[in-house]
Every structure is written in structure tokens, then in C-alpha cells.
Image (tube, helix red, strand yellow):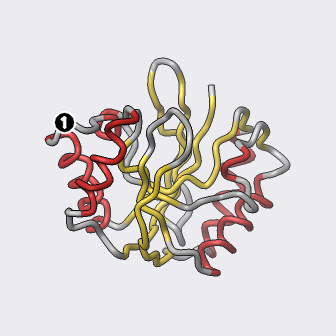
Amino acid sequence: MSYAITLSFDEATDIAIRKAWWQLADAGLSEFMLHSKFDPHVTLEIYEQVDMPALQAALSSFLATATPIPVKFSHLGVFPGAEGAIFLGLTWHRALMDFHTSFCQMVSSFLSGANEYYLPETWVPHVTLAYGLKEDQVGRAINFLRQRDLPDQGRLTRIMVTEMGSEGNKLLFSAELGMRGEG
């Protein structure tokens, strides 16, 4: 079992990203994100083990001073490997990177098994648009998405902790940035 800690978007951005997911599905390119049971999000980190009471206490304190984070989307990208993943990339900026680094430092003592892709020095902030594409679908999906009206900006407004298991995902914690958590 693993745990994803993610940031989700304001309503308008969420709707725009879901629209892209539906368009990809309607075009027969990818339905994966529609069935993932995740909201459109940016992953902060994925861990193998979590001390949930300690995490909830730390997040409640951490989030009381956090504010929604404005973001700009600057590019479509493809991760290397067999996963066939296409993403909408976020433009790097200090507030986003500082939030991520502070978060990783805050949780390091009670979370273990961090996924190296999400460590501060290797993190690529992104929103997954398609996953599980075959090699011949990747180029078609990129061309398809380039012709769509994708969002160019948004706001990250909520943090979520999700348990990911073989029988599906379970939301364990959710809170608006700037508020205390609902667990």
C-alpha cells in the first residue's frame, strides 16, 4: 500500500482539466484518468508508510499558515518509460517550490519510503492528462491536446492524503490551504 499527498485545484481549473480527460476518452486515446478516482491534482509526494495521526497533526499546523498557490501551465510533456504518461506542466516559481520543500521537510520524520520522483531536487510539478498510452498513441494524444483549449493558469487550493491500495483509493485527509484539516 502507498499514500499519495496531492494538491487539488480551484473549481474552474478542475473543470477544465476534467474536460481534457473527457476529450481524450471520447477520442479513444485514454480513459485512465477518468477511472483513477483522483481529482485533477499535483502530487507532492508518494510514500510507502505513513504515521497518519502524526501527519494529520503536522498538516493542521502547517496548513493554518498556507495559502492557495497560483500556478501557470506552460507546456505539455511526456515522461520517459513504458507508462505512456502525458502531462500538463506547471511553470516553476518560488512560492510553489518553497511550499513543496517546506512540506517535504515537515513530514520527513514520520513518513517513509518516499518516491524519488517527488523529492525537492527531482520534482516535476505537473497534472497528468493521460496514462497507459501505447507508444503509437503518445504522439497522437499530444497533437490532439495541442488543439484543445487547455487551462493556462489556476490555483492550488486543497491538500489531500489518499491511501492507494489494490482495491482502490481511499481519501484519508482533506483540507483547504489556510484551514485546519478534515480527517
Left of 55 or right of it: where is 156? Answer: left
Amino acid marked by disc 1: Gly
Q: Measuring from the top left, give residue 104's x and y in whole percent.
A: 74, 58
Left of 145 or right of it: where is 3? Answer: right
Left of 132 or right of it: where is 61? Answer: right
In the rendered image, which residue does mark 1 sit on?
A: 28
Q: Measuring from the top left, give residue 119's x and y in whole percent.
A: 73, 54
Which of these two is toward me, 177 or 85? 85
Q: Residue at x 54, y 72 (%)?
A: 178
Question: Could you say whether the residue bearing mark 1 is in a helix, strand or loop?
Answer: loop
Number of dots carrying numbers: 1
Residue found at the far left of this picture: 26
Q: Residue at x 55, y 61 (%)?
A: 125
Q: Residue at x 70, y 62 (%)?
A: 103
Left of 39 or right of it: where is 158? Answer: right
Q: Measuring from the top left, give residue 46's x and y in whole percent.
A: 64, 43
| Structural crowding at the residue carrying mark 1, measured as other residues with C-alpha within 10 Å and reported as few (<14), some (14–19) or many (≥20) | few
Query: Which of the image's four quarters has the N terminus?
Result: top right
Residue found at the far top of this picture: 167
Q: Measuring from the top left, give residue 41's x and y in whole percent.
A: 44, 54
| 131 lies above or below 150 | above
| 73 lies above or below 86 | below
Which of these two is toward me, 92 or 177? 92
Query: Which of the image's four quarters has the C terminus?
Result: top right
Residue found at the far right of this picture: 109
